[in-house]
């Protein structure tokens, strides 16, 4: 194998058996999205740098975004970093009817350090509701992702819920962080977001580096320690910070969200979960499993100001992004999926000799016309070699054609795993059998 022609670090090839399996998972996710009334859109993988600039935060811009200058036009371009910012641009320029419920499954690129569950090219499955400011829209997004998890066979997962306004209110009340200037709270959120990556001490260290005092850093750590049963924790916060505009707005919104959700039992409140991206304005959430430790499988939240920044009218929006690779990697470790299917071919027409090549092709043609997925030998191989190929590829059914079949307009069907034979079966009947038994 040549390393010279390998793929870049953090990027991968997918052979057919993996590509087929991934596609199946995407189809299952898509089915749930469509059940909730989301329609697909597509946007380009490349955006103008101007479009992405200033939306994610300093670290993303300086280190994680793939940015390059087009050598012909000399324009600055970037590979999309997520699917939410392109959606905001899309909505501002297309002004769709609201609420606009769109889903988008596609690849995104981040120049991160590759490790378990972290790639440089990966797929996100996003569903967003554009236009509704109400908690029932956030609840629908949470329910949607819980349904996806259940559909894929996950059971012991948790939705960690928070609201950007909760911490903002607590910080205002206890620390007066706004005296450091507008951007300080966002900077603090970005530091807290690293809690899982760098631990408590790491976070405290970074808070000090960001110019906060030790007392302030300690108070912040105390605040993010709050977690537990959502109803109970919210009413505690409400009475502790009575009169604080941000806390009251967040508590009211989250209480309604929880009341509207059909997956209340999967939700915990967790003030340490802040989400790394700058554009969130209200409720935020992430989906986790206890094992394996792979980070969030999905994350989302409300971003009420983003679309306006592209020149559209004020358009409150909320959504979720499911990380396909983590869903798959964790599911494989948990034994939720099997990788048995190696091909989408249902049947191979094996000809017993040169004289039957043309009949084999006409059988394949007829089967394809009836919607079956069929291969016919294109390598002029003897029947043994054709059978070896079917075995290696895991093709379930074989349609033998030889002297008797060609002269009577029949095929002899054979199902490899079941070792079941249907001798010289008229083609029409064989097609019905295949439709029934070779899915
Ligand atoms: P984010 O846009 O950062 O909120 O990410 C949404 C989801 O994408 C996360 O919950 C992860 O499941 C997934 N994700 C984020 N970064 C990566 C990565 N580098 N590799 C694979 N999946 C990722």
Image: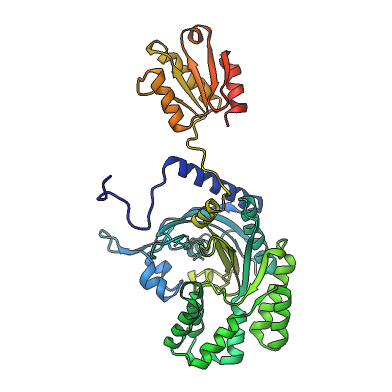
Q: Nearer the viewer, residue 193 or 165?
A: 193
Task: Judge left or right: residue 435 versus residue 77.
Answer: right
Above or below for 220 versus 437? below
Q: Nearer the viewer, residue 398 or 291?
A: 291
Please provide percent x and percent y for residue 19. Answer: 46, 44
Name the residue rendered at 54%, 19% in the picture.
413
Above or below for 167 versus 91? below
**Residue 96 occupies which quadrant of the picture?**
bottom right
**Residue 355 occupies which quadrant of the picture?**
top left
Quadrant where the N terminus is found in the figure:
top left
Q: Nearer the viewer, residue 378 or 296?
A: 296
Above or below for 335 versus 392? below
Please provide percent x and percent y for residue 107. Answer: 45, 55
Name the residue rendered at 35%, 20% in the picture.
380
Name the residue rendered at 60%, 74% in the picture.
282
Please provide percent x and percent y for residue 320. Answer: 57, 62
Above or below for 247 versus 97? below
Please provide percent x and percent y for residue 11. Answer: 37, 55
What is the number of callouts on the image? 0
């Amino acid at each position: 194998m040549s390393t010279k022609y390998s793929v870049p670090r953090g990027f991968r090839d997918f052979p057919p058996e993996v590509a087929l399996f991934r596609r199946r998972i995407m189809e299952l996710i898509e089915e749930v999205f469509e059940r909730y009334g989301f329609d697909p859109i597509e946007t380009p993988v490349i955006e103008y740098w101007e479009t992405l600039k200033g939306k994610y935060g300093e670290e993303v811009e300086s280190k994680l975004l793939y940015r390059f200058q087009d050598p012909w036009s000399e324009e600055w371009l970037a590979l999309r970093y997520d699917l939410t910012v392109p959606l905001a641009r899309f909505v501002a320029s297309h002004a769709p009817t609201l609420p606009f419920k769109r889903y988008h499954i596609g690849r995104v690129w981040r120049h991160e350090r590759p490790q378990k569950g972290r790639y440089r090219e990966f797929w996100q499955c996003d569903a967003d509701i554009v236009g509704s400011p109400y908690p029932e829209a956030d609840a629908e997004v949470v329910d949607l992702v819980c349904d996806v998890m259940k559909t894929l066979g996950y059971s012991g997962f948790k939705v960690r819920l928070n609201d950007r306004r909760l911490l903002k209110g607590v910080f205002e009340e206890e620390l007066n962080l706004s005296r450091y200037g507008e951007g300080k709270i966002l900077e603090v959120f970005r530091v807290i977001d690293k809690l899982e990556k760098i631990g408590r001490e790491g976070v405290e260290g970074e808070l000090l580096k960001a110019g906060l005092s030790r007392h302030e850093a300690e108070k912040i750590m105390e605040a993010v320690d709050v977690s537990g049963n959502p109803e109970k924790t919210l009413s505690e916060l409400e009475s502790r910070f009575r009169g604080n505009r941000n806390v009251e707005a967040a508590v009211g919104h989250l209480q309604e969200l929880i009341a509207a959700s059909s997956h209340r039992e999967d939700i915990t409140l967790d003030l340490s979960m802040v989400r790394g991206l700058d554009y969130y304005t209200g409720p935020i959430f992430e989906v986790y499993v206890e094992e394996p430790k792979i980070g969030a499988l999905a994350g989302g939240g409300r971003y009420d100001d983003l679309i306006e920044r592209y020149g559209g009218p004020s358009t409150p929006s909320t959504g979720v992004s499911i990380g396909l690779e983590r869903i798959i990697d964790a599911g494989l470790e948990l034994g939720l999926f099997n990788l048995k299917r190696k091909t989408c071919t249902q049947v191979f027409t094996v000809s017993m000799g040169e004289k039957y090549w043309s009949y084999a092709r006409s059988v394949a043609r007829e089967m394809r016309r009836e919607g079956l997925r069929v291969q016919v030998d294109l390598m002029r191989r003897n029947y043994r070699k054709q059978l070896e190929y079917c075995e290696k590829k895991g093709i379930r059914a074989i349609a033998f054609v030889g002297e008797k079949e060609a002269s009577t307009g029949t095929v002899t069907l054979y199902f490899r795993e079941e070792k079941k034979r249907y001798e010289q079966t008229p083609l029409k009947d064989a097609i019905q059998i295949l439709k029934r038994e070779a899915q």
